Image (cartoon, rainbow, N blue to C red):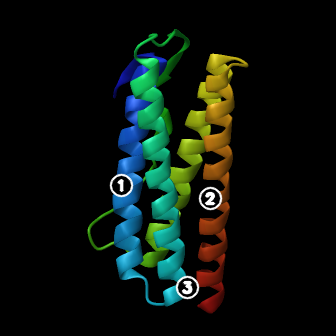
Amino acid sequence: MRNFETVGDIIFFAIESEIQSVEFYNRLSEAAEDDETRSLFFGLMEEEKDHIIRLQYLLDHQLENGFPALKNFFSDENYLPHVIPSPDVTMEEGLIIAIQKEKAAIRLYKELARETEKTDLSKFFLLIASEEEKHSMKFENEYNALLAKK
């Protein structure tokens, strides 16, 4: 368990989480049986890479000014998926984990937005949260389509 003291600490964690998502979605893309599913994972992987770039930019530029201390308690336990993917994860399991990862990211960014209260940082985190919500919906749709094929 890792507790965070500043917004910067959480952004470091968010970057790590986004990197893990990129790696995981790449694995799922390579394991996909059809082009449409492969394309879905690849596209979302690219969007997560964009999140990494934007978070890193924020981190690099905000470090000059310092990040505010946190008013509320933040721990990584609240923002991790409940299941850790195994190397031989099935597509169904992968989609469930992907949905969990996206929902955890949504929680993280929305709570960061509340923490930073009506600032440019808050708007930034809400934008990332809305993008993660779109990812979650895409994974849920893919999961439902997979179940319908059974």
Please, what is the three-letter code of the amino acid marked with disc 1? Ile
Q: Is residue 8 above or below residue 82?
A: above
> Residue 120, which numbered label?
none
Q: Are marks 2 and 3 in contact (CB under 8 Å)?
A: no
> Is the residue 107 above or below the residue 75 in the image?
below
Give the x, y percent position of residue 124: 63, 33
Tag in front: 2 or 3: 3
Of residues 54 and 74, the one nearer the viewer is 54
The percent position of residue 69, horizontal first and vertical second, equals 49, 8
User: Under tag 3, what secondary structure?
Assistant: helix
Res 117 → quadrant: top right
According to the image, label 1 marks what residue? 84
Image side of residue 34 versus residue 148, left or right: left
In front: 124, or 97?
124
Residue at horizontal 61 percent and vertical 82 percent from the top: 147
The residue wearing badge 3 is 36
Q: Amino acid at mark 2?
A: Ser
Instruction: Name which residue lies at 54% across and 44% down.
Output: 104
Of mark 1 and mark 3, the one earlier in the sequence is 3
Task: Kindly identify which residue carries mark 2.
Answer: 136
Quadrant, the N terminus:
top left
